[in-house]
Amino acid sequence: MNSKSSENAVMDAARWTGVRRRRWFFWGLVVVYMPAIATALHFTESMQVAGILFLSWAILLIIAVCLVATAKCPACANNFYMRNGSLSFSARCRHCGLVVRGEPGRE
Ligand SMILES: [Zn+2]
C-alpha cells in the first residue's frame, strides 16, 4: 500500500515535470525570437540568414505548440492545455481545473 502511494507520487512528479518542461520550451522560444533575429541581423546584415533563422524558429514553435497541446494533466490524464480543439496557455487544466504547481502566486 505504501509503495503504491510512493509509486503514484513518482508518476505524479514525472507528469508535472513534463507539463512544466513543455510550457517552458514554448515560452522560451517565444522570448528568444526577437533577440536572436536582432543579433543575426546585427552581425550578418543578411536577410537570408534572418529568413533561415525565422524558418527554423517557426518549425520549432510548431513542435512546441504540439508538445504543449498534448501535455497530459497529472490529475485527470486529459490534455492539460487543450479542450475541444482549442488551446489555452493558462496555468489551469482545461478539464479538471488543476493549477500548475510552482507558478508564482498559485498552489
Ligand atoms: Zn486535469
Image (spheres, rainbow, N blue to C red):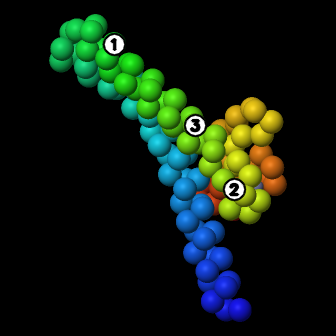
| Tag 3: amino acid | Cys
Q: Residue at x 70, y 49 (%)?
A: 80
| Tag 1: amino acid | Gly
- Could you tell whether 65 is left or right of 89 in the image? left
Residue 74 location in percent, x, y? 68, 62
Q: Is residue 89 above or below residue 92?
A: above
Task: Kindly identify which residue carries mark 3.
Answer: 66
Q: Residue at x 57, y 37 (%)?
A: 66
Numbered mark located on residue 17 in the image: none
Task: Kindly identify which residue carries mark 1.
Answer: 51
CA separation, marks 3 and 1? 23 Å
The 10 Å Cα crowd at callout 3, few under 14, some 14 to 19, many 20 or more, is few
CA separation, marks 2 and 1? 36 Å
Task: Kindly identify which residue carries mark 2.
Answer: 73
- Closer to us: mark 3 or mark 1? 3
- The answer to whether marks 2 and 3 mark residues whose Cβ atoms lie closer than 8 Å is no
- Could you tell whether 50 is left or right of 8 in the image? left
Q: Secondary structure at mark 1?
A: helix
Mark positioned earlier in the residue sequence (3 or 1) = 1
Residue 15 location in percent, x, y? 60, 62
Residue 33 location in percent, x, y? 40, 26
Q: Is residue 68 above or below residue 37?
A: below
